[in-house]
Image (spheres, helix red, strand yellow):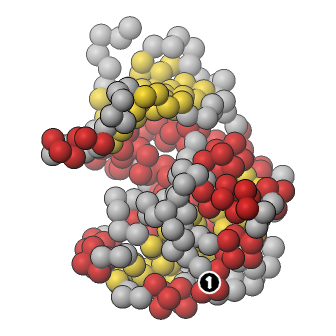
Amino acid sequence: MQSSIPTIAAADVHAALDWRLLVDALRAAFAAGATAPVRSSHAVTPEGDRLLLMPAWDGVGGLGVKIVTVFPRNRERGLASVGAIYVLMDGATGHPVALIDGEALTLRRTAAASALASTYLSRPDARALLVVGTGALAPHLAAAHCAVRPIDDVMVWGRRPDRAEQVAATLSAQGLPARAVARLDEGLMHACIVSCATTSREPILLGAQVRAGTHVDLVGAFTPEMRESDDTLVARAEVFVDTYAGALKEAGDLVQPIERGAFARERVRAELAELATGARAGRRTRDEVTLFKSVGTALEDLCAARLVAQRFR
């Protein structure tokens, strides 16, 4: 093992991963493919503390694993409940190459994957973006979408208006044309792209309120019990996923309507790898509603980690 392995902090991760650079790298990674087993989850304590492992390798020198801990009781200790680190290894020797901040890596690659999907699924002239949710991912989603489409109006909506104002102010300070909106339906009336990242267990986006031609990016609901869209929206839309294996197992936005018979699994048009290779088409008409559901895949982590390490060196 190397005597000194570089540790790459969050600020360096964000600085290394330019949005267009990362989107293009992810496009190539999905087209090339990698082995990325569905994440494994282990109970650490009876109180609900868990360890998650997300490995991936690509057969051409890339090998790594994201180690995530979820300790809900950390809130009582004044600590974050989720911790993450990425261990990047040499694919030829198996030796560690770098330790990378896992939270920053996840934020960056998740938003970039949504932007990658948008290049296939949103209208090329999309100018109005609505971000639903005000968590840590929200400003990254806005910036990533703005990097691939000519957005000149970024709307932010959240259940807490003060948080929506804060996110909009953060984006404005970054030079993006951002504003908070008081009503979700107001934002939906104008949006060409809707990017939703919440922890909701009940539908927030209703099919009846989404206008024709909209691209809907669903990021937040990552368990079968969570929902961000109603059955009407899923049934109305042309549906795409990051991976069949992950989304059809973990995404409540698809799992629930499939179980109820409101949506058929066969109606999922494509996963990102098929879009990246051109095996299947994305948006076909100007007026269709497209929906992209992501739950994340270790392929994205490996791609982003290798890019960080290359630029860091």
Residue 145 visible in rendering: no
Identify the residue shown where x is 67% and y is 55%: 255
| Quarter of the image where the N terminus is located | top left
Residue 149 quadrant = bottom right
Q: Horizontal placement of 41 versus 124: left or right?
A: left
Residue 52 coordinates in the image, percent (x, y): 45, 32
Query: Residue visible at 58% across and 52% down?
Result: 224
Q: Is residue 303 above or below residue 274?
A: above
- Closer to the camera in the image, 123 or 136: 136
Q: Within 10 angstroms of label 1, few (less than 14), some, or many (20 or more) residues?
A: many
Query: Residue 259 appears at what percent x and percent y?
Result: 73, 56
State the count of labels: 1
Q: In which quarter of the image is residue 12?
A: top left
Q: Mark 1 points at which residue?
A: 210
Q: Which residue appears at 30% of the width and 10% of the height?
A: 3
From the top left corner, tell me how far across and down residue 41 is, in percent: 49, 31
Relative depth, front residue between 115 and 55: 55
- Residue 290, above or below 104: below
Query: Seen in the image, is 140 located left or right of residue 254?
Result: left
Q: Is residue 12 above or below residue 164?
A: above
Residue 11 in view of the camera:
yes
Height in image: 3 above or below 294?
Answer: above
| Type of amino acid at the residue the image marks with label 1 | Val
Which residue shows up at 69% across the image and 86% down it?
212
Q: With 82 as the anchor, is 56 left or right in this view?
A: right
Describe the element under mark 1 as helix, strand or loop.
loop
Position of residue 15 measured from the top left corner of the image (x, y, whole percent):
34, 50
**The C terminus lies in which quarter of the figure?**
top left
